[in-house]
Amino acid sequence: MKKSEIYVPFVPTPPRVVGCMLDMANVGRGDMVCDLGFGDGRILVAAASPPYNAKAVGVEHDKKRFHDAKRLVKHLGLEKSIELLYGDIMDFDVGDATVVTAYLLPNANDAVKPKLEKELDTSARIVSHDYQFYGWKPSKKQELIVPTPWTFSYVPGSDKDAFGISHHYVYLYEMSKIR
């Protein structure tokens, strides 16, 4: 797959899933968290903030999302902790990352897999939201059921709407177990 064929729509990761991803990867002060396709920047902001206090860097191909996230990072005063890059994830060197976060579609995971294998240190961890890296065995997998306030449904016999729920999966991969 050519890098120009990688397309991933922006779908925000719920805050509870962000926390699960960072907790599962055991993110801390000494980490460099890299988000592939950072969207609105929420994973980077969470990683750079307490309780994680990590350095964070991400790459985004959507200009509007890139500029919106840049404004958010500046507004929060996190410019020293977060580096935002505009461009293609295939042109971005992930070699300094100790943790890589991804919410990519399966074809995009397949495309970046050789890059991660080549560039990441054996101590690096990869956390994927919803989609596995096929061919790799996750060290951990967690299912989360998250209320989605934007999905309402009518409950028969009730005068109230019910919040919808969505199922999310988080997969942790450790490079030391992949190689």
Image (tube, rainbow, N blue to C red):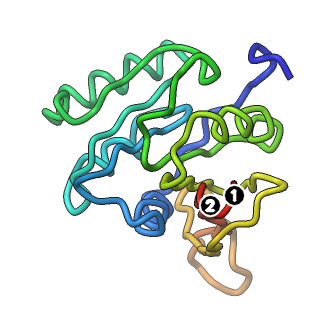
Q: How far across and down, in percent of the image, does residue 67 sit?
A: 38, 16
Read off the residue under disc 1: 178
Judge whether 41 appears above or below 3 on screen. Answer: below
Q: How far across and down, in percent of the image, does residue 85 sit?
A: 42, 19
Read off the residue under disc 2: 173
Q: Amino acid at mark 2?
A: Tyr
Q: How many marks?
A: 2
Q: How far across and down, in percent of the image, does residue 152 sit?
A: 63, 63
Q: Residues within 10 Å of mark 1 (few under 14, many from 20)?
A: few
* Quadrant (top left/top right/bottom left/bottom right) for the N terminus: top right
- Check disc 2 and report its element: helix, strand or loop: strand
* Image quadrant in which you'd find residue 120: top right
Residue at left offset 66%, top offset 66%: 169
Judge whether 64 appears above or below 125 on screen. Answer: above
Q: Nearer the viewer, residue 64 or 161?
A: 64
* Image quadrant in which you'd find residue 150: bottom right
Q: Nearer the viewer, residue 107 or 95?
A: 95
Residue at left offset 45%, top offset 65%: 16
> In front of the other: label 1 or label 2?
1
Residue at left offset 36%, top offset 27%: 69
Residue at left offset 81%, top offset 18%: 5
Q: Which sits earlier in the primary sequence, circle 1 or circle 2?
A: 2
- Check disc 1 and report its element: helix, strand or loop: helix
Q: Residues within 10 Å of mark 2 (few under 14, many from 20)?
A: many
The reply to whether dot 1 and dot 2 touch (C-beta < 8 Å) is yes
